[in-house]
Amino acid sequence: MIKEEHVMPQSLNDLLNSGLKLGVSLLKKLSIFFYVMVLVYFFLLHFVSSLFMEGSQLSTVFMSFASISFSLAATAYLMYFMMVTDEHSKKDQRKLVRRAFNKLIPSLIIGGTLIFVLSTLGSMLFILPGIILFIYFLFFPQVMALEEKKQVFKALKRSVRIVRGSFFVVAGVYCLFLAVQAITAIMIAFLIESSSFYVTAFISSFVHISLIPFQAAVLNLLYLERRSEREAFDYEVFTYEAKQRLKA
């Protein structure tokens, strides 16, 4: 899925265009099972939140943690899809991705918890430090998926090093997708005009299902572009790392 032109320094405009095209390809590659699982995940989140924590700060914390966890997991999962080549059938591609991703789940849970805790603590002191920390950790799932960084702390430090020097570019791209998500959710909620639990859960699920492939594709390409800009990292190195990780 990743081609040679994706693993080289490029303008932000070209990167966004490439990412959106890859996002369309990801939408087509993903199975119905993936979409059903996302739907079930967000319905369960809203059910638990409304049943036990409605109107409390705990509900906000719970939903924030769940959203961050989903974003990290989905980004890593879709990174694997971008790593597989078209020489495999769709069935084999999905099998390779599931096998590699399943091994990553414990590390993603630990890393997601650390990112959430550190970002929350930073936000409790002053809002800005928490946001800055979160941006610096954005490439954690990509590092875990592609690089040989089995230890969570090493992967977090590696993410910080890659983001350093490109903070505002990375933050700008992430904020762009946050804005699109927020606007889309608000527009749908305005058109439907309902505060029902089922409607809220459906809107949340629909927005994430529709946008996460594009967000993941762009952020994954940005990660590759940053590495190619700073390191001896090209398409040949990428294909080697991808094969090593998918067969591990």
Image (cartoon, helix red, strand yellow):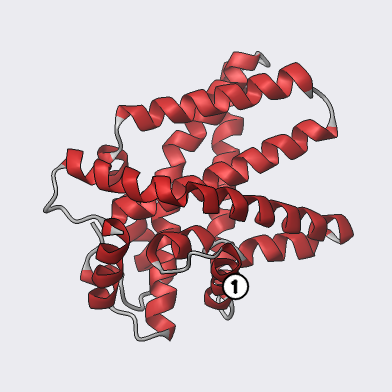
Residue 242, position as x, y percentages in the image: 29, 64
**Relative side of 82 to 132, left or right:** left
**Relative side of 50 to 42, left or right:** right
Q: How many marks?
A: 1
Residue 162 drawn above or below residue 55: below
Residue 155 drawn above or below residue 84: below
In the figure, residue 146 lies in which quadrant? bottom left
- Asked whether residue 177 appears in the rendered view, the answer is no
- Residue for point 13% across, 43% down: 89
Within 10 angstroms of label 1, few (less than 14), some, or many (20 or more) residues?
A: some
State which quarter of the image contains the N terminus. Answer: bottom left
Q: Nearer the viewer, residue 245 or 94?
A: 245
What amino acid is at disc 1? Lys
Residue 71, position as x, y percentages in the image: 53, 46
- Residue for point 60% across, 73% down: 157
Return the residue at label 1: 157
Q: Secondary structure at mark 1?
A: helix
Residue 209 drawn above or below residue 226: above
State which quarter of the image contains the C terminus. Answer: bottom left
Residue 77, position as x, y percentages in the image: 40, 48
- Residue for point 26% across, 61% down: 2
Residue 12, position as x, y percentages in the image: 42, 69
- Residue for point 34% across, 53% down: 80
- Asked whether residue 56 appears in the rendered view, the answer is yes
In the figure, residue 233 lies in which quadrant? bottom left
Q: Nearer the viewer, residue 103 or 114?
A: 103
In the figure, residue 3 lies in which quadrant? bottom left
